[in-house]
């Protein structure tokens, strides 16, 4: 499980390190993904076993919601996280937040 957070610079560094260490086939869970389209594409194309966790912060990020709306069915590698310590989940708010996903 990896959490890179921030402005995306840490995600770029971690991805470069994973490539350098030849870890592109290791199963990876990107915890609380809050990236943009490019970051999702970079990680999913370089890491065949990378899954992106969605937590409350993911749905609060306009860039992440925009990215999720643009995903094609074949590109979806998402995990719905429910253990976010800073914002307890309420079933109704989770369902409301993910209503835009057609699948």
Image (tube, helix red, strand yellow):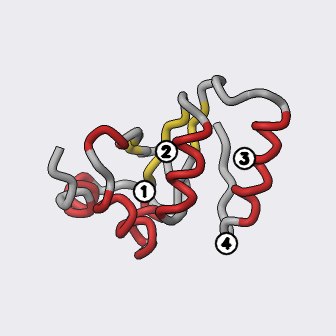
Query: Is 20 left or right of 6, judged from the image as shown?
Result: right
Other-residue count near label 2 (Cα within 10 Å), few / some / many at <14 / 14–19 / ≥20: many
Q: Which residue was labeled with disc 4?
A: 7
Q: For the residues carrying marks 2 and 1, which lies nearer the camera in this image?
A: 2
Residue 54: percent from left, percent from top: 43, 51
Q: Earlier in the sequence, mark 4 or mark 1?
A: 4
- In whole angstroms, how far apart are the C-alphas of marks 2 and 4? 17 Å
Q: How many marks?
A: 4
* Disc marking residue 15: 3
Q: Earlier in the sequence, mark 3 or mark 4?
A: 4
Image point 41% across, 75% down: which residue?
62
* Disc marking residue 16: none
- For the residue pair 82 and 27, the one nearer the viewer reads as 27
Q: Which residue was labeled with disc 1?
A: 88
- In whole angstroms, how far apart are the C-alphas of marks 3 and 4? 14 Å
Q: For the residues carrying marks 2 and 3, which lies nearer the camera in this image?
A: 3
* Mark 2 touches mark 4? (CB < 8 Å): no
Q: Earlier in the sequence, mark 2 or mark 1?
A: 2
- For the residue pair 87 and 55, the one nearer the viewer reads as 55
The image quadrant of residue 18 is top right
- In whole angstroms, how far apart are the C-alphas of marks 4 and 1? 24 Å
Q: Which residue was labeled with disc 2?
A: 52
Q: For the residues carrying marks 1 and 3, which lies nearer the camera in this image?
A: 3
């Amino acid at each position: 499980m990896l959490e890179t957070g921030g402005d995306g610079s840490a995600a770029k560094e971690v991805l470069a390190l994973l490539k350098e260490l030849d870890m592109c086939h290791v199963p990876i869970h990107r915890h609380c993904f809050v990236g943009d389209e490019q970051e999702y594409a970079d990680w999913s194309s370089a890491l065949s076993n990378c899954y992106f966790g969605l937590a409350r912060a993911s749905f609060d990020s306009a860039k992440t919601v925009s990215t999720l709306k643009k995903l094609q069915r074949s590109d979806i590698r998402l995990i719905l996280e429910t253990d976010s310590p800073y914002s307890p989940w309420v079933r109704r708010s989770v369902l409301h937040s993910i209503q835009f996903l057609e699948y």
